[in-house]
Image: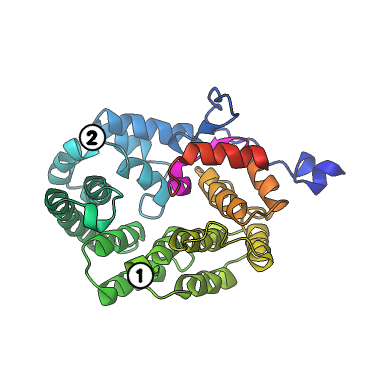
Amino acid sequence: MFGKLFGRGAGRPVADPHALPVPRRQKNGMYTLRALGDARVLALVEAADAGDWTAVKAALAPFDLGRDHQVLGELADLDGVQDWIGRAVEEDKEHRATALLISGTRHVSWGWEARTAARAVNVTQEQWRVFHERLRIAEEQLLEAAELRPEWVTPWRRLLTSGRGMSLGRDVNEARLDAALRRDPLDLETHVEWVSQLQPRWGGEPGQALAFARDALARAPQGHRLGCVIAMAHIEEWVESDRGDCLQSDEIRAELRAAADHSVLHPAYVRRPGWQHDFNMFAMALSLADERHTVRRVFEALDGAYTEWPWSYFAEPEKQFARRHRGA
């Protein structure tokens, strides 16, 4: 009985044959998720880390890189990819679109690494120069990838990020948003990226992001991960606010509970590689709202699995996760 009430027992998800073994936990019971927790993704990451393009292509076989943002993100964040992917772009005509997508996406991340997370006034002229140089390469490559494979959504989501960094303006970015949503109207990563762009720090108006997120949730089927956009919209509100307790209201707690029940905690939710990222979004939002019941269910499902995003909004993200995990 109690297992059913708290999502255990008969409701436990079927074991994933590709799931990586849980690594040795830290003293606080947490561990950092690696390669989306999936052995196939780990093989892809290891091939990319070795600069083996043939092995990368083989490891990509189970995935659709034109739609799977999370798998693409594992390559985008891997230092060193930029050193060899250019050869694949020039030499492998058959897989040029895939190579362009990986290279362009890596150059977006590589550009932001050069800029750093510092406030704009604290970014040096040299950092700005490298930032824009890398983003210009990313723009060219992602636009060509999108032209070669017009059904892909992932280039357009990454072009939203580069467009924001290049200050290309609202009209350009809205056109890119429309291009992404025409290909997948329920794409979570595109919605989350637009929630960021609607923040006042990027020229948006207060309340715009939440309105956009609520409209998205209203269109999402039960069990769809798009419900995470509500969690991220509230986290972004917290980032913008000068009050640490700005999410601690009954209305916000109720909205977050409803969104979690509609999406990640719904029986129809499918735990794909990297599902822990979805749960981490809700874990952070619910804990910031000082919600006491649903946050326990979310942390229980995570069982200590920590993802850097979105906790990186904190100065000490791992400590924050561990503390809130214990508190739940």
Q: Is residue 67 visible?
A: yes
Query: Residue at 59% of width from left, 49% of height from top?
Result: 283
125 or 163, nearer to the observer: 125
- Please state the horizontal and vertical placement of residue 160, each as a whole percent of the image: 31, 63
Query: Residue at 65% of width from left, 37% of height from top?
Result: 326
Badge count: 2
Q: Is residue 172 above or below residue 116?
A: below
Q: Is residue 18 visible?
A: no
What range of the chain is rendered magenta?
302-312
Sequence order check, earlier mark of 1 and 2: 2
- Please state the horizontal and vertical placement of residue 297, each as a whole percent of the image: 69, 46
Q: Is residue 261 above or below residue 179?
A: above
Instruction: Look at the image and name its color scheme.
Output: rainbow
- Please state the horizontal and vertical placement of residue 210, each as a whole percent of the image: 51, 70
Q: Is residue 309 shown in magenta?
A: yes
117 or 210, nearer to the observer: 117
| Dot 2 crowding, Cα within 10 Å, few <14, some 14–19, many 20+ | some
Give, as a three-letter code, the residue at label 1: Leu
- In the picture, measured across the screen, residue 291 lies left or right of residue 104, that is right
Q: Is residue 169 above or below residue 294?
A: below
Q: Are marks 1 and 2 in contact (CB under 8 Å)?
A: no
**Residue at the disc numbered 1:** 177
Q: What secondary structure is found at the residue carrying circle 2?
A: loop
**Residue at the disc numbered 2:** 80
